[in-house]
Image (tube, rainbow, N blue to C red):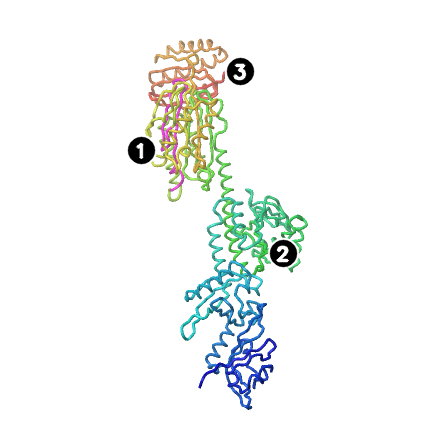
Amino acid sequence: MEQVSATAVVDAHGIVTGWSEGARRLTGYPAEEAVGRPVRALLAEEPPPGALTALSGPAVLRHRDGSTVTTALRACPVLGADGRPDGFVVTAGPETPPEHVLAGQAFQQASVAMSVFDTRQHYLRLNEVACQVMGVPEETLLGRPYLDSVEDTAPNRGFLEHLRRVAETGRPARYESFASAPALDREQAWTIEMWPVRDAGGTLTGVALAALDSSDQYWSRRRLALLNEAAAGIGTTLDVVRTAEELVELFVPQFADFAMVDLLEWVLGAEEPPDAAADEILLRRVAHSSVTRGTPEAAIRVGESDVRPADSAAARAMRVGRAVLSQADQPEFVGWITDRDTRDPAGRPYRRGAHSMITVPLRARGTTLGVAVGLRISQPDAYAADDAVVVEELASRAAVCIDNARRFARERSTALALQHSLLPRGLTGQTAVEVAHRYLPCGSQAGIGGDWFDVIPLSGSRVALVVGDVVGHGIQSSATMGRLRTAVRTLADVDLPPDELLTHLDDLVAHLADEQDGGEVPELGATCLYAVYDPVSRRLTLATAGHPAPVVVAPGGDAAPVTVAPGPPLGVGGLPFEATELRLPEGSVVALFTDGLVEHRDRDVDRATAELCQVLCAPAASLEDLGDGVLKAVLPEEPGDDVALLLARTRALGADQIATWDVPPDPAHVAATRQAAADQLTAWGLEETAFVTELVVSELVTNAIRYGEPPVQLRLIRDQALICEVSDGSSTSPHLRRAHAYDEGGRGLLLVAQLTQRWGSRPTGRGKTIWCEQPLPSG
């Protein structure tokens, strides 16, 4: 039997307007009896639920002879000029098998949005969820192009491109999209599966898709990525303000439209936390950021203070230690916005639409430092409990970094104050040398180092020039530097030669290391250079303990590092220190420095030393200007270590300021020596000092002859004080003691100590020298 398609055309009002031969054969009604009748009059039973919406399903027709015909109907909409259905073409076929019915029900009732498009990207089918997402019934979309049903945005154009690609290639596709559906008021994440649909002959007839709302998974991944980003992006510097800026940069625009960080006042200073919390909290704005250029939402500017009442969100968050959520329908939130609008009316338009705020305390190591606040204006979603968990984690990480920065700043300030208190201040008034010095603490995160220098007056108008470096940074290094400087001054007071002084200092450092647990302390990395200049002989004697050699510049000549015998760093022990001696012309410049001046990871030490020598030879109006020129020319732009620079221009005492006598080792020559000294004082115009000087000369020369060994020498030096020196060949130093009533001697040194301003003894290469000083007459 010939198979003829049974087809009818039904208008939008349900009236039959067309009738095929196949329809006549199926129902027995000729066209003249069927056309014009309501289509429902041809049904023996009402269609099953969902069949009209699905435009397909089983139907029971009424035959002209009174019998019933069971068949399967499919309807296809006929679109008018406006794109809306004007009617339907209904085709009858064999009854749909039960499995097909089940498949259709599964399609309609699926929990994910499912749709079918033809090869030209026109709608063919949509299930219930897809209709809900699109916000319109299925018949409104059937036959329409996809892009006519949505806005022309990048995500929607990407969706259309994937539809075309599947239709052209016949290969399935899977991708993720973040877009807003027409019926939804916010953007959502979608995981979309597309696959080709083929007929029985294998011809590609359409593209089917399933779209799964994966927003929860998407935001979970975003929160995890945000935490990972926080780990790498917060705390890159040990700076409180910069750390706060990094936090708000992370908040905006991912997590907030406007964010701010306010800290308690004491966090930005060197104070410790207050003992008790006040009713009102004073916070200082340190950072804020906005999606809008210029941050117009901020009523409080960076650097300004703001008082928060006890019932404010900030105060409650700091009190309970947890995030506080505020919504637009809450009186507290409305009051906060109103207060900001009153303070800053110009920002009112930018705050309009603000609907959700989260306030989280910044707590680290049990101490509250301030609050971070996020505000949503254009983002539609309000802050929820999941957001609070993420924000608290971000705030916790930021708070630790802020606290680290605060502690670093406090330690740096303490170390810098300690170091400045330990470094010498008044270095003027020296006869032997003119000095200038510079000390620059490094700006690195490592903290203040242990560089130091000193200028120590010695007997006989001599002067000691010292520079040292304690490896390491922080308060420990500064404290160690202070201990070493004190030790050097103590040893210098004994007037030891440079090599012997470093030997004693090395022993001291070793003992200090032994006192510490494990023996590993910063002292083990200490270096030192000790030099003594004598303006009488114009000799410079120096020894080094692992320290860079100084540079000497002759008057009008070249500059060159001094060739010194290298010594090990302090605390190593086991190796001797050797002294180097050189004679300097008057006006020579000696430059002592720490390794931070010439050593840097990005440049060669020899080249930096050559640059130092070159700039030291450059003309300079004064020693101070020369020091500035050295730092400007040689110092790296970002020094990685402290820098200490000590410049000394040598002076020399003239022959008219020095008188020397060799004394025969016979007490009979004491009187003649005393008279010669008195005559010299008269020549210098120092007759007022003659009485005391004669007594001192008598006692010291007599002691040298009686208890010392030849040769004996007397030397008077007229400098800022009158210096009397008696040398002999014995290395035994005298000691001041109290003589008993019947002792015949023992009162000489006591008499010298009482008559002079200072006295002492120092070893020499051939014995010792006893010296004393008395002030010159005023006027």
Q: Is the residue 359 above or below the residue 206 in the image?
A: above
Look at the numbered disc 2 and give the secondary structure of its residue. Answer: loop
Q: Disc number at residue 778?
A: 3
Q: Nearer the viewer, mark 2 or mark 3?
A: 2
Amino acid type assigned to the residue bearing label 3 in the image: Ser
Q: Is the residue 186 above or below the residue 530 in the image?
A: below
**Distance (Cα) linking label 2 and label 3:** 84 Å
Q: Residues within 10 Å of mark 1 (few under 14, many from 20)?
A: few
**Distance (Cα) linking label 1 and label 2:** 78 Å
Tally the numbered discs.
Answer: 3
The residue under label 2 is: 353
Q: Is the residue 318 above or below the residue 20 in the image?
A: above
Relative image position of residue 427 (x, y in whole percent): 48, 26
The residue under label 1 is: 575
**Distance (Cα) linking label 1 and label 3:** 50 Å
Quadrant where the N terminus is found in the figure: bottom left
Taking the image as shown, residue 379 lies to the left or right of residue 521, namely: right
Task: Choose between 84 and 213: the one closer to the eye.
Answer: 84
Query: Which residue is pictured at 45% across the width and 10% down the height?
Result: 678
The earlier-in-sequence mark between 2 and 3 is: 2
The earlier-in-sequence mark between 1 and 2 is: 2
Relative image position of residue 511 (x, y in whole percent): 38, 37
Magenta-drawn segment: 520-549
Query: Which residue is pictured at 46% across the width and 54% down the height?
Result: 228
Amino acid type assigned to the residue bearing label 1 in the image: Leu
Quadrant where the C terminus is found in the figure: top right
Circle 1/circle 3 CB separation < 8 Å: no
Relative image position of residue 708 (x, y in whole percent): 35, 18
Indicate the quadrant where residue 540 lies: top left
Q: Is residue 742 visible?
A: no
Q: Is residue 575 visible?
A: yes
Look at the numbered disc 3 and give the secondary structure of its residue. Answer: loop
